[in-house]
Image (spheres, grey):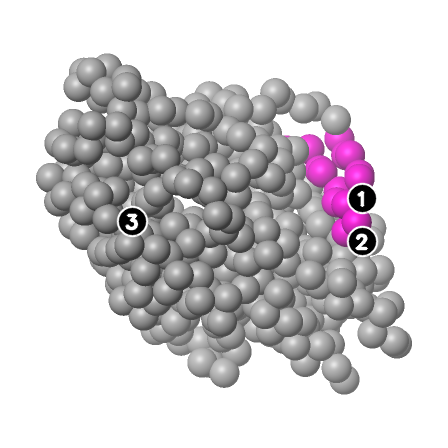
Amino acid sequence: MGETQSEVLVVSQNYPPDQGGNASRISDTCTHLANKGWRVTVLAPPPAFPHGEFDRNWTRKETHTEGNVTVHRLWAWQPTDTDPSFVSRLAYYLIFPLHALVWLLFNARDYDAMITSSPPIFTGTVGIVWRLLGRKPWVVDVRDLWIDASIGLGFLAEGGLLERASRAYEGFMLRLADRVTVTTTVLGERLSDQYGLDPGKIVHLPNGVDTGVYEPTDSDADPEIVYTGTVGYAQALEPCVRAMSEIEHPDATLKIVGDGDIRTDLEQIVDEENLHDRVIFTGLVPRDEIPGILDEAAVGIAPLEQDETFEYAVPTKAYEYMSAELPVVATGVGEIESLIDDSGGGVFVDTDPEKLAAAFDSLLADAEKRATFGEAGRTHVVEHYDREVVAQELNDVLRDVTTP
């Protein structure tokens, strides 16, 4: 079998026009793999994230081709409320892998390897059956400690039946896989400790960024602080919004690009604090507009809740800001702080409105400081986090596990 004939099946809950870091990561990864000789097929549900931004689709299956990538959209429940109920979320997460599983039973023989993207962890159901049907390789791509995050955010009761069942399932899935790719080293260590995984099967593949797309120009930046991505519970956006009532720069604005569960809550704070001239919500915008939005801004924010639950996390947006030579103001714990320290691409502060406002003012008042941070950040991501480089590492993993 020649390399150009190798077929890989990618199963992901999100794929563009879904928004968010994982949708773009999977899309870019598939494109790069196709360019490296793989025939890539993606299974994904109809677009539904952020919830409430897409019309519900009742078509059983839609197929389209993007370059050398074939995408099958398999029907699944699509929440239309901005903050869906637990039942609606669960239906979204469960129906898609069940539909994908039925599809797989008729098409498994066409593929040489499978990648399932987690979270949600239920995409792994397709991989489990894939492995039980034969010995073809399976790679689990893990971007998040989904169970821990669900407990930390109050969606799952610690020690309850659902947590125990979820951990048993996740452990079985990861032990059965041939390789487990993780976005940060801390994430890999946590999974290894939690489930007794062989460290040799864990491969570090960071989120990364397409540095050729997120490239700076010489345009003058507005005094604008920008956030791009999911407006959700894990993102510490409330103190960022409140910081705009403390900021001293007369023309500074915060632009929140994206949508999600807590947008309504943030809009209420804007109303209460009379920040309509300071805070702008754009809602969803086409992905190809994001580089231009970053190019017009002065500062990018990557706020995570200051909770050890998220110590493994580095949001994709942080790499995108750095690639666009935007200085980054970050919050959280663990890996995100290490990225800021190692890159020299910004500042790390507590999730406190006054401290955030001080960081914003300091950067907006000093163009030389912004340029220094921006240049250091771009140099760092070009060397270590370009998605072409990351995709080559994944290609090597796939070639390794598919070689007899």
Q: CA distance from mark 1 to mark 2?
A: 7 Å
Dot 2: element: loop
State the image coordinates of residue 101 (x, y, percent, origin top left). Answer: 69, 48
Dot 1: element: strand
Task: Report crowding for label 2: few under 14, some 14 to 19, many 20 or more residues within 10 A (C-alpha).
Answer: some
- Find out whether the residues at labels 3 and 2 contact each other: C-beta distance under 8 Å: no
Q: Amino acid at mark 2?
A: Asn
N-term-proximal mark, 1 vs 3: 1
Residue name at image x 67 percent, y 24 percent:
57
Above or below: residue 374 compared with residue 160: below
Residue 62 sits inside the magenta stretch: yes
Q: Which residue position holds label 2?
A: 68
Task: Report crowding for label 1: few under 14, some 14 to 19, many 20 or more residues within 10 A (C-alpha).
Answer: few
Residue name at image x 38 percent, y 32 percent:
256
State the image coordinates of residue 28 (x, y, percent, origin top left). Answer: 63, 54
Kindly tell me whether residue 16 is visible in this rendering.
yes
> Magenta region's main secondary structure?
strand
Using the rendered view, name the quadrant where residue 287 is placed.
top right
Q: Which residue position holds label 1?
A: 65
Q: How many marks?
A: 3
N-term-proximal mark, 3 vs 2: 2
Q: CA distance from mark 1 to mark 3?
A: 44 Å
252, 319: nearer the viewer? 252
What span is in magenta?
60-76
Residue name at image x 16 percent, y 27 percent:
245
263, 8: nearer the viewer? 263
Dot 3: element: helix
Residue 337 sits inside the magenta stretch: no
Q: Which residue position holds label 3?
A: 367
Residue name at image x 62 percent, y 65 percent:
388
State the image coordinates of residue 217 (x, y, percent, origin top left). Answer: 51, 48
Task: Report crowding for label 3: few under 14, some 14 to 19, many 20 or more residues within 10 A (C-alpha).
Answer: few
